[in-house]
Image: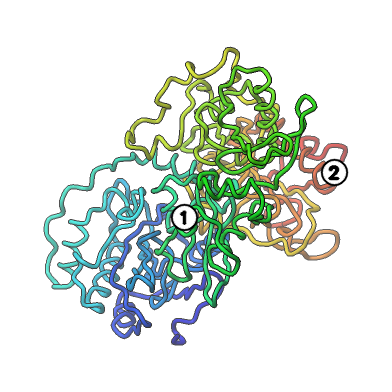
Amino acid sequence: MTTQDATTGMPPMIGRCLTIPQWLDYVARYQFGQLTPSKVVLHHTWRPTVQQWRGLASMQGMQRYYAGKGWTSAPHIYVAPDGIWLFTPMKDIGIHAGPGNGSLKAGWYSIGVEMVGDYDRERPSGAVWEGTKAVLGGLSRRLGIAPATLIAFHRDYSKKSCPGWAVTKEWVIGEINAWLNNVAPPPPPPPGPIGPIPPDVEELAEALLDQSYARRGEGYNSSWAFHQFAVENNLGFPTAKSQRLTHGGKTYNYQPFARDTLFCEVPNWGEVQRLSQLLAGSIPPPGTLGRALLDATYATGGSAFRPDWAFHQYAIAGQTLGPPLEPSKTLVVDGVSYSYQVFATDTIFNRGTEWQNIQRLSALANTTNPAQAKVRDALLNATYAAAGQQYRPDWAFHQLARTWNLGAPLGKTDPITVGGKQYNVQVYATDTLYNIVPNWSDVKRLSAIFGPQQTLLAAPTPVAALLSPGAVLAPEWDTFYIRRFTVAGRAPSAYGSRSGSKIRLIVLHGDEGPALRSLEQMAMPGAASMTHYYVAADGAIYQLLDDEFAAFHSGIAYWNGARRNINRSSIGIALERPKHGYTDASRRALAWLIARLRARYDIPPSGVVRWGDMAPSAANDLADLPREWYREGG
């Protein structure tokens, strides 16, 4: 690697910004490695937008975002309002387009080019488009490949709109050909039509996928070949994060999903393989790649693989159970002992020592036999407990999951907000159920968005016909509850490690709102700051970041007589303060949240402070907030 391509951090980033003339000189002299790229995949960032772009800070934010997702590589080039930014060295295979990443094994790979901005409704223009033409034209000239052959779109390899529905191949290729020949471009064709999934539905689908993949994985990444392959092949959701193992001197990435474990040799990201095809229904001997992957898959569920166990033999022979979610256990129903093990798509069990008589929980879903119903409900309680949730036979989500055989729950029912609307969400191994609040009876399935009837969001059968009388359609929330805020598959980047510091403070910040705009700005990759929580004027409480991380909300200030990094030892809360003043709803929500956090981290009343009390430059921040609202007993 040349000095000019030196990288820092993880995933490795060059982090240099070039002008168009500098880029053209750079690409003309560029020396690729053992393999020369043969495709360029065009993307748009969607967020950050052109207005949100902050140069190097945004690039570093993207790097933190990718690192938080576990990426070891990234797109190669970002074309921004301020220039052409270099991320992944072009001689290396990047991660940006799932199966469109390519691989050494396949003998090809692609360069990922991100245009900063959202181009679902309008084409890129100005500095971003001029830079993009130079990047695509320069690569076409350097590689000797015509634009029509060279250029692909991210949506060629995924269900996303990327690089935006307004961007069409006809327009891009015409523009790049004109750039290469130094002639005026042809008249632009009409903007591209909205795709098969409208932008608002795509945003909801991305958010639901991210929630579903984050229950036990790292969140949804449409640029990952594993995740795109899982969506395309209906493998359900991950039961653990992507991991690595070394076998036979080679390194492999693998990730268990509800219906199969996917793997690939590093760095052949696009060459996705399935463990079930490698095993072909048999247990491989020790020392083979198949056995190593099988052992690793079971270990992610806390269960050592035992080839002599009937449960494990049954699971491998059937090839439909997926990975285990916890070790095998026992329970007693009416004095009879049962062994059981929760797998992703079903729970299997047997009575006493009848190891040859293994049964499936799903087979008892609609039983009317009282004795069988007792066993079923006991096993459902155990299955939900594995996800940290109580089974509620009167809840609509739980009844429908049993009826539709969606597998084990992967977490609790949670609320999320997307596009200004609130949804309740319950993630199961093979599908996610959701409804718009307060339309409790309108339960829908995530899979329907991507199914053959892409405009159909409701279940094929009316939900009311599938529910028992008295079904509870609304979850029982606290007076206040915390909503997880996400932005359509994106993850925030304005955070770091606490570096071992204990949480000792709660720091309050004021925000003029409106709430959803502020939340979106903080939650975007590349944002400079964010808080852990946001209390809106209507009393809604949003969480943007897990408490275990240090959000960039305060910085350096004096506390307890010393100058400290307050971020590392504090929880940040933003309080919406409209111009007309505080609201009773936000006051009560703030007091509820502070009491909850103080109890969790044993924080005294003196540990709840306004940022304006610590930083003289921010003295006016919440200066009129009554102390009794937030410092109970202080």
The residue type indicated by label 2 comes to: Pro
Between tags 1 and 2, which lies in front?
Answer: 1
Q: Nearer the viewer, residue 59 or 433?
A: 433
Check residue 280 in the rendering and tell me which mark sits there, or answer none.
1
- Residue 152 position, x and y percent, is 27, 61
- Residue 101 position, x and y percent, is 38, 65
Residue with the mark numbered 2: 605
Q: Is residue 60 above or below residue 20?
A: above
- The quadrant of the image that shows the N terminus is bottom left
Residue at x 77%, y 24% (from the top left corner): 334
Which quarter of the figure has residue 135?
bottom left
First along the sequence among labels 1 and 2 = 1
- The quadrant of the image that shows the C terminus is top right
- Please indicate whether residue 132 sits to the left or right of residue 328 in the image: left
Q: Secondary structure at mark 1?
A: loop
- Residue 208 position, x and y percent, is 49, 41
- Please indicate whether residue 532 sits to the left or right of residue 9 in the image: right
The residue type indicated by label 1 comes to: Ala
Q: Residues within 10 Å of mark 2 (few under 14, many from 20)?
A: some
Check residue 443 in the rendering and tell me which mark sits there, or answer none.
none
Q: Is residue 422 visible?
A: no
Q: Nearer the viewer, residue 245 or 410?
A: 245
Residue at x 33%, y 36% (from the top left corner): 454
Q: Nearer the viewer, residue 631 or 388?
A: 388
